Amino acid sequence: GEALSLQIESGEIAADGDALARTNILVNDHGWDKPLASKVWAFGPDHSGANLLVDGTRGKVGGMENIKDFAVSSFAWSTKEGALCGGELRSVCFTIVDVVMASNATRRGSGQLIPTARRAMTAAQYSSRPRVVEPVLLIHVLFPLQAQETVRSAVSSRRGTILHSPP
């Protein structure tokens, strides 16, 4: 939720921080399951954002350590360029719950796993009913009266609204 995202963005919870402290915060403050909270693989994008990649396979899948780097790369890519408009994601948690790996090692390389994991994360985004959030800013602009038309034009060209103007 938003509280967790704010803690990550403030640095209280960090990718390079103490894993045990992070697990305790996730369990005690945010109601996470302890085994799940201890398996956070990555923050993203850029290893510090308020998005999480979690290994939720709970030991049911062998060899997860062999694909971790590929999954983290896919996660970084997915959170940097989301499914809607290619924008950066915020407050998203991807939990890997099952993996079926090819028995042939040549079919488990980065060329196969990274695009496949990215497509799975894109599908997860679409199935979660995503929405685009547009920033709204309230600004005060002081300008000479003779520049009023220029300012009005600039504001309206960016879908802005002037709330108060001189008479």
Image: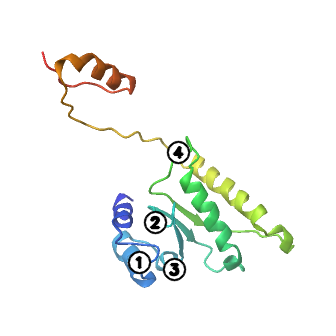
Residue 9: horizontal and vertical position, in percent? 37, 63
Tag 4 or tag 1, which sits nearer the N-term?
Answer: 1
Q: Nearer the viewer, mark 1 or mark 4?
A: 1
Determine the CA span between mark 2 and mark 1: 14 Å
Task: Name the residue: 34% across, 24% down.
Answer: 154
| Residue 61 visible in this rendered orientation of the protein | no
| Quadrant that contains the N terminus | bottom left
| Numbered disc 2: secondary structure | loop
> Please, what is the three-letter code of the amino acid marked with disc 2?
Ser
Rendered position, 34 above or below 158: below
**Dot 1 surroundings within 10 Å: few (below 14), some, or many (20 or more)?**
some
Asked which colour scheme the image uses, the reply is rainbow
Three-letter amino acid code at the position of disc 3: Pro
Q: Are marks 2 and 1 in contact (CB under 8 Å)?
A: no
Circle 3: element type: helix
Asked whether, in this view, residue 111 is left or right of residue 164, the answer is right
Identify residue for label 4.
129
Find the distance from the CA under tag 1 to the CA under tag 4. Answer: 29 Å
User: Which residue matches tag 3?
Assistant: 35
Residue position for label 2:
48
**Residue at numbered disc 1:** 22
Q: Earlier in the sequence, mark 1 or mark 3?
A: 1
Image quarter where the C terminus lies is top left
Marks 1/3: CA distance? 12 Å
